[in-house]
Amino acid sequence: MKVRGIRGATTVDSNSKEEVINATKELIKEMMDKNGVTIDDICFILFSATEDIDAAFPAQAARELGMHFVPLLDFSHMKVKGALKSCIRALMAFNTDKSQEEIRHVYLREAKALRPDIK
């Protein structure tokens, strides 16, 4: 079994605790569903958020989904002129027998613009 990574991103409509938590839950669930991942498969999840998001930690959403023992880390995404705003990104490392080509990365809402090559 190997450790593979799933990339994902989403955006929020407002900088509110409820919006950050709900958007992050939607992202995590979609990443897990599209790749057949269970909580027990997850090694860790790294979350980044653009500087305009400070109402809640995205990792709180993972905890609310039952990830009490999964290592989680939140950090600020680097600021780049012209970059997508109100964006939460995630990197989920998990144990799997899948090849890299089989991994389905997830980009939701306005974050679809980050990877137009991924449907």
Image (spheres, grey):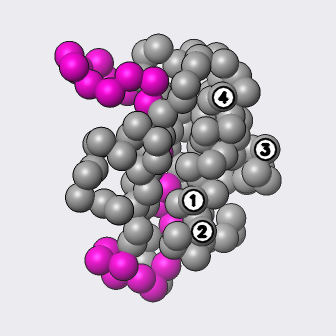
Secondary-structure class at tag 4: helix
* Label located before the other in sequence (3 or 1): 1
Q: Are marks 4 and 3 in contact (CB under 8 Å)?
A: no
* Label located before the other in sequence (2 or 3): 2
Residue that label 1 marks = 30
At x 59% / y 17%, what residue is drawn? 15
Label 1 neighbourhood size at 10 Å, few (<14), some (14-19), many (20+)?
Answer: some
Q: Report whether residue 112 is seen.
A: yes
* Label located before the other in sequence (2 or 4): 4
Q: Position of residue 27 (x, y in %)?
A: 56, 49
* Label located before the other in sequence (1 or 4): 4
Q: Are marks 2 and 3 in contact (CB under 8 Å)?
A: no
Q: CA distance from mark 3 to mark 1?
A: 15 Å
Decide whether residue 86 is among the magenta residues: yes
Residue 104 left/right relative to 94:
left
Residue that label 4 marks = 19
Amino acid bearing label 1: Glu
Amino acid bearing label 4: Glu
- In the rendered view, would you say 9 is above or below 96? above
Residue 99 left/right relative to 82:
right
At x 49% / y 55%, what residue is drawn? 92
Residue 33 circle label = 2
Q: Report whether residue 76 is seen.
A: no
At x 30% / y 42%, what residue is drawn? 113
Q: CA distance from mark 2 to mark 3?
A: 17 Å
Label 2 neighbourhood size at 10 Å, few (<14), some (14-19), many (20+)?
Answer: few
Q: Position of residue 103 (x, y in %)?
A: 39, 72
Q: CA distance from mark 1 to mark 4?
A: 16 Å
Label 4 neighbourhood size at 10 Å, few (<14), some (14-19), many (20+)?
Answer: some
